[in-house]
Image (cartoon, grey):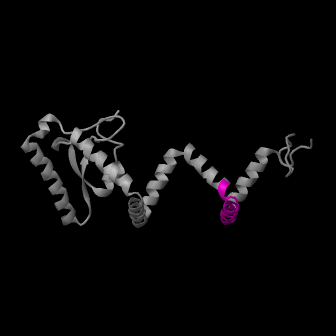
Amino acid sequence: MKPCKKCGAENRNKSGNCIPCSRASGAKWRKANPEKKKANSADWQSNNPERARINALAWARNNPEKCRINAANWSKKNPNRCKANARAWRKENPEKCSVKAARRRAMKVRAIPSCGSNWFEGLLVKEVYILAKTRSLVEGKPFHVDHIVPLISDIVQGFHCSSNLQILEGSKNCYKGNRTWPNMP
């Protein structure tokens, strides 16, 4: 076997360089030619759509945190498309929306503590919802009533009572979801 043209190592490939030298050379070329690299990549993806899809799925499976960050960044940059996509999904999946709404109603009923069944607690909860709606009208952006400790979570279940409610800006509430709460494990 002939030695590498660059470093003299014995392990040589078709280009005449060893694998580490070939990779370094390729990285140098990609850094110097980002537009050509992008065009080559797009060309390969269009010629190999199934393989590109498999590679993208594998990358997503191995990089869930980066996927979440990328999705959040895309959502921030494209709020109108997000809303349109959500609207289209709801229109195409009315049965899933109904199931989700029914499940949430059931969770709320089960999450009302016995002390929450009195009329005063019901009045306080109602006032929080009225205040959120009023704040939305006054400030011109949506505000949601958020359960501080979520009603539906794999780890914990909060109560549907006034002490577990807060008013949050709609986008912050949607971002929070049921993933975070105070003193979470």
From the image, give the main secondary structure of the stretch colored magenta: helix
Quarter of the image for the N terminus: give it: top right
76 inside magenta stretch: no
Q: Which residues are magenta?
A: 33-50
- 43 lies left or right of 80: right
At horizontal 11% and vertical 43% (from top left) the residue drawn is 121
Vertical placement of residue 35 versus 113, above or below = below
Q: Position of residue 149 (x, y in %)?
A: 27, 40
Please tell me which residue lies in front, 27 or 55: 55
- 78 lies left or right of 162: right
Quarter of the image for the C terminus: give it: top left
Please tell me which residue lies in front, 138 or 18: 138
When asked about the image quadrant of residue 115, the answer is top left
Vertical placement of residue 30 versus 103, above or below = below
When asked about the image quadrant of residue 18, the answer is top right
Vertical placement of residue 115 versus 57, above or below = above
Viewer can see residue 159 = no
Q: Position of residue 17 (x, y in %)?
A: 84, 48
At horizontal 37% and vertical 54% (from top left) the residue drawn is 95
- 66 lies left or right of 53: left
Residue at the outermost right position: 1
Viewer can see residue 61 = yes
At horizontal 15% and vertical 56% (from top left) the residue drawn is 131
